[in-house]
Amino acid sequence: MKGEQLGEFEELVLLTIAYLYERAYSVAVVEELSQRLERPLSLGAVHRTMQRLEEKGMVSSHLGEATAERGGRRKRLFTVTAAGEQALRDLRRIRHELWTGIPTAAWGGRL
């Protein structure tokens, strides 16, 4: 189904949410992903992607506790759903099959 497919950026954001586990909120995802991609990311772009992933049922969110660090505001924390985990596992399997299926000659005889 079209709505269940993930774009490349959605996959990266979903992986980052899984990686951060209980610390996954929009600012933390931006910081982690920006560091790994070695380029700045827009908070708005990441936030919209997280909302889209929630609409697709790949993540769920809830409000965390208010903290003094944030002036009493609460963070919206995201977790990967079973559907999101399955989508990531399917993508990993497909990528692994393709990588391992590349003939050695395709890399000039080295791999």
Image: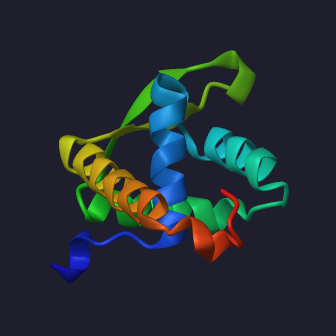
Q: Is residue 23 left or right of residue 77?
A: right
Report x, y in % for residue 62. 35, 36
Kindly identify the residue that appears in the image at 30 percent across and 47 percent down. 89
Residue at the left extreme? Answer: 1
**Which quadrant of the view contains residue 78?**
top left
Residue at the bottom extreme? Answer: 2
**Which quadrant of the view contains residue 25?**
top right
18 up-or-down from 108: above or below: above
Kindly identify the residue that appears in the image at 33 percent across and 41 percent down. 80
Report x, y in % for residue 71. 70, 27
Quadrant of the rendering where the C terminus is positioned:
bottom right
The residue lying toward the viewer, choosing from 75 and 15, is: 15
The residue lying toward the viewer, choosing from 52 and 73, is: 52
The residue lying toward the viewer, choosing from 103 and 69, is: 103
Report x, y in % for residue 82. 20, 41
107 up-or-down from 69: above or below: below
Kindly identify the residue that appears in the image at 36 percent across and 59 percent down. 97
Quadrant of the rendering where the N terminus is positioned:
bottom left
Q: Is residue 23 left or right of residue 93?
A: right
Q: Is residue 11 left or right of residue 80?
A: right
Kindly identify the residue that appears in the image at 60 percent across and 75 percent down. 106
12 up-or-down from 82: above or below: below
Q: How is the image coloured?
A: rainbow
107 up-or-down from 29: above or below: below
Report x, y in % for residue 4. 23, 70
Total labels: the figure holds: 0
**Which quadrant of the view contains residue 5?**
bottom left
